[in-house]
Amino acid sequence: MRLDKTELALVGLAVVLMLAGTLAAPGWLIFLITVALAKALVVQGVVMQMKAGLVSFGQGLFYCVGGYAVGMGGQFLGLNAGLVLLALGVIAAVVLAMVLGLLLTRYREIFFAMLSLAFSMILYGVLVKSQELGSTDGFNVKAWTLLGRTIEGGEQATHTVFILTVLTAATVAFILHRFYRSAMGMTCEAIRENEVRVEFLGLSPRWINYANYVAAAAVSALGGGLTALATGHVDPDMAYWTTSGEFVFIALLGGTGSVFAPFLAAIVFALVRTYAIEFLPNAWQMILGFTLLGIVVFLPKGLWSLFTRRAVAPVPSSSPTNARTGGVRA
Amino acid sequence: MKTVRSMTTPRPGRLAAGVAAVALASTMLTGAAGAAENGKFRIGIVTFLSGPAAGPFGIPSANAAKAIVEGLNKGALPAPYNTKGINGAEIEAVIIDEAGGATKQVEEFRNLVQRQKVDAVVGYISSGDCLAIAPVAEELKALTVFYDCGTSRLFNDDSKPKYAFRTGLDAAVDNIGAARYLAATKPNITKIAGIQQNYAWGQDSWSDFTLALAQTMPKVKVVENQMPKVFQGQYGAEISALSVKKPEVVHSSFWGGDMEAFVLQANARGLLDDATVVLTCGESALDRFKDQAPNGTIIGGRGPFGAFAPQNALNTWFVKAYTDTYSMAPTYPATKMAQAILGLKAAAEKAGASAGTVPVMDAIADAFKGSTFESVSGTVKMDRADGHQALQPISYGTYKYDPKTGKATIENVITFSGECVTPPDGTASDAWIKAGFPGAKCN
């Protein structure tokens, strides 16, 4: 297996992050990065669909399913193996996405966005009415184990979830990077540019979107499960539309230029937010708003455009299609 | 295809530079913040500064925290809190916003403890936040005082708290108190209805209230309960549904803008001509109802707080200090915040560190456990949940508005002792109510 530069960078960064995190970083920063990376997985799900021209305003649905699977698996099924709980979330999300996808993939643009939002709000409504699940208060995740070792509280727990999250995120990013360069990944971009042409090539945009939607659900559920393991609590807010909005926000912040972009954007978002809360407790939302405004105005292709070659310009033959591939269609 | 790849492949040099920049920035910022070694007693105050709970609860709480901290730093409070700061160390309050959900609050709690190095955290209105924070407080061994959230599950879910305390009362107490107040003042009613916000608070309140009512007034029939979604604001349909059942009493756990909107609309629609409404959180809008709430409306303040707080030197000082700065009397969330900080001061000074120094968290936690301290609401005993949960009386009374002075007061106050409305340790509140309040000692 030959690794390209991105893949090498991915492996290198994951190793550096794990070493730096466990050896040097303070506890709060490790936790912040853990949650940011877990959320970035949900953002990856959003970006997967953005690449195919669809903006999901309901990715919180699968984030919530992943989280609740971890919580409920421990609470009601007596499962406590962390990896089994994560897998449970992925399976639940995939099954749900396979059903919802049948309907959702018929729609495009704002109709897709609104319908995806509607489904996540239905889950929110159901959870709010479930008193056994603590309604809006949610409930705590029971103690869990990883490969037979009980994860007790304290530094060890923080580090374990951190390493688990970094490994999962790196693996998913690796697969996604390969996927984006595969024939099907490229077809997703082609669908965004011109669906009719794709059909005339003999491919079915609908089923490609369907597969993409289900895969995005699985990735997002992993993010939800890891967040639940890290914070130890799940509540219906995970499916609320503002949560989904945050994922779209982070996706726009990063751009669709690389698999790194959502991770970078999620960490930057978390750092900006926590310092905004610390220094401007009454106006932190404004700082986040100005940050997004600044990104949209000055870096329309997201933070990632800082790291790509300002190239394309020296290649006079580049078509408008290619010039747009790296960008965000906001 | 080639262009695509060159676009999406990062330049390794720039990537490394970017990562280094982020890492550097975060270390620099860490250095700037972590300075609990300044000898001050740093308290993290977490309450809603934005969103619907900010107006009625969060802002009054934050104001109370500022008033109390300023007063303590000047040594202006009456005895037994007439010493400066906490254990002689100046208090520094770090106030942050509770909005944003439990995941974010867990993250910010860790930031407060590990980055800002606070010596204690006082806060949390939302029950979901309390549930999520409690295990993290134990994990980080961080002294945490929950001042307002009411969930009965806080110290129930197989938890053995050491560092988490709650100086506010369990929400079950509100509703047991409301059921007892009705039994004492309106023994002849037969039909009762309810309207609650459809989320954990409303659902739990109604279930506790109906269970308690079945014990205190077994003959009363519950004729209707409406559960509109939270922050709905318009209650026309619900008021009609309640009106047709002709209840004599309507119980509501509404709070904030929803409560004021409901009272205004129900009054205009005539529902309140025939029915008396019981508002378990009514005290928080005492100065805002004016002539919109009919006289005789039964209101509570979630304990002996706000307008229900007793006349004592501490409360007199607090009401004056608060009113002077914020030109309105403190409501119950403000009293509760003041109480939490006073409880913390009392415990820290009992911890036995030499004067002028900040005691270690373990020592404060040991001293806090099972302690008894004087507060703006009278004497508080940390007598439940193995010494981690406050035990206090609860009061209800009726609303009385004087159009001449434009002032509202509360009359016909009945106060039920803590032992009368709080389950003993080891018994869940719903089980205790269903069993008929075994062991309750009522005055």
Image (cartoon, rainbow, N blue to C red):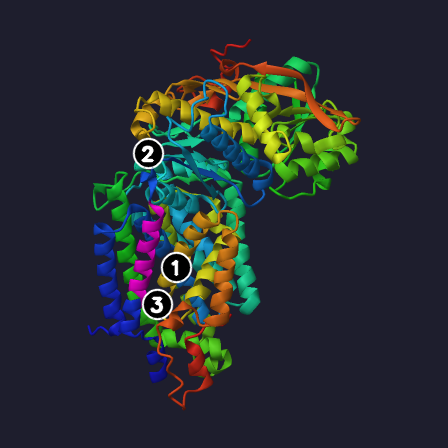
* Residue A259 tag number: 3
The residue at which mark 2 appears reads as B138
- Considering only vertical position in the picture, is B137 above or below A324? above
**Sequence-first disc among 1 and 3:** 3
- 3D distance between C-alphas at marks 1 and 3: 15 Å
- Identify the element where label 1 is drawn: helix
- 3D distance between C-alphas at marks 1 and 2: 29 Å
* Residue A268 tag number: 1
Locate residue A161, reporting x and y percent. Answer: 28, 48
Q: In the rendered structure, are the residues bearing label 1 and label 2 in contact, judged by CB atoms less than 8 Å apart? A: no
Q: Amino acid at mark 1?
A: Val
The answer to whether dots 1 and 2 both sit on one chain is: no
Evaluate whether residue B301 shows in this view: no
Could you tell me which residue is drawn at 30 percent across and 25 percent down? B363
The answer to whether dots 3 and 2 both sit on one chain is: no
Q: Amino acid at mark 2?
A: Glu
Q: In the rendered structure, are the residues bearing label 1 and label 3 in contact, judged by CB atoms less than 8 Å apart? A: no
Q: Nearer the viewer, residue B76 or B16?
A: B76
* Mark 2 residue crowding within 10 angstroms, few (<14) / some (14–19) / many (20+): some
Evaluate whether residue A272 shows in this view: yes
Foreground tag (3 vs 2) = 2
- 3D distance between C-alphas at marks 3 and 2: 37 Å
Q: In the rendered structure, are the residues bearing label 3 and label 2 in contact, judged by CB atoms less than 8 Å apart? A: no
Q: Amino acid at mark 3?
A: Val
Q: Nearer the viewer, residue B104 or B425?
A: B104
Magenta residues span B18-34
